[in-house]
Amino acid sequence: MEDRTQSRHSHGLDQFLASIQGQAGLSILDLAAASQSSVSFITSLGHKIYSEDILRSLDSAFGDGDYKLNQADPARIELFWSQSLDHPADRFDGALVWDTLQFLSPPLLETAVARLHKVMRPGAYLLAFFHADEKAQSIPVYSYRIADAKTIVLGSRGQRRTAEFFNNRTLEKLFQDFHSVKFFLTRDHLREVIVRR
């Protein structure tokens, strides 16, 4: 059977982990669903990890029928938010968002970023990935697992259309309520973004 995983070096992950180094007992949010390697890695550093599968919640709420139209249905939106980013304010010291935000329609995306801002503590860091090929009709979707401090393992979850293309200017506007935004452009058309709350 073909191996549907690949490893890649991540400057963004390296920077994210540097932000929590030398501390203990922090709470980290992981939006790529629970993975044993990520849980083991984060807990070995003395932190707690809370996992959500945003893509599964998206499919559960909007997946049958027209995916884009469904993201404008108030009942479906309410279902989605009942399953996603529903945490108390100032709960997390870091968030591993991965590539999940790029599949949300603009209104959902704005709400998601506002919720992330609310649930993260001041000074906390967020790591997010955005596909950087604006000509792509659809892009690969991955599950993410931490292999070590500088390496992630990507598992294929098929292809999806993005809701919109994100360049540096778009991302700076998206995260305008946060303290800072830093970009790493990779060889494989991923823009890694480190955002400080």
Image: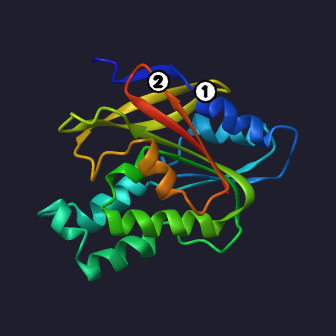
Relative to 180, does residue 157 appear above or below in the rendering? Answer: above
Residue 93 falls left or right of residue 97: right
Q: Nearer the viewer, residue 93 or 158?
A: 93
Chosen colour scheme = rainbow
In the picture, measured across the screen, residue 190 lies left or right of residue 138, that is: right
The residue carrying mark 1 is 11
87 w.r.t. 157: above or below: below
Instruction: Tell me if 138 is positioned left or right of 31 in this view.
Output: left
Tell me whether the residue at label 2 lies in contact with that at label 1, contact meaning CB atoms closer than 8 angstroms.
yes
Q: Quadrant of the C terminus?
A: bottom right
**Looking at the figure, which quarter contains the N terminus?**
top left
Residue 113 position, x and y percent, is: 50, 62
Q: Dot 2 surroundings within 10 Å: few (below 14), some, or many (20 or more)?
A: some
Give percent across and percent down for residue 64: 16, 63
Residue 58 in the image: above or below residue 171? below
Q: Nearer the viewer, residue 80 or 139?
A: 139
Q: Residue furthest left?
A: 65
Image x and y of residue 168, in percent? 45, 42
Judged from the image, the secondary structure of the residue bearing numbered disc 2 is loop
Query: Disc 1 residue type?
Result: His
Q: Secondary structure at mark 1?
A: helix
| Distance (Cα) linking label 2 and label 1 | 9 Å
Picture residue at 27% right of the left edge, 47% below the top: 162
Q: Residue at x 46, y 65 (%)?
A: 112
6 horizontally vs 70: left or right: right
Q: At 27% across and 36% down in the image, what residue appears?
A: 134
Q: Decide: few, some or many residues near mark 1? Use Cα within 10 Å; few <14, some 14-19, many ≥20.
A: some
Which residue position holds label 2? 186
Q: Nearer the viewer, residue 168 or 87?
A: 168
Amino acid carrying mark 2 in the image: Thr
Residue 151, percent from left and from top:
58, 23
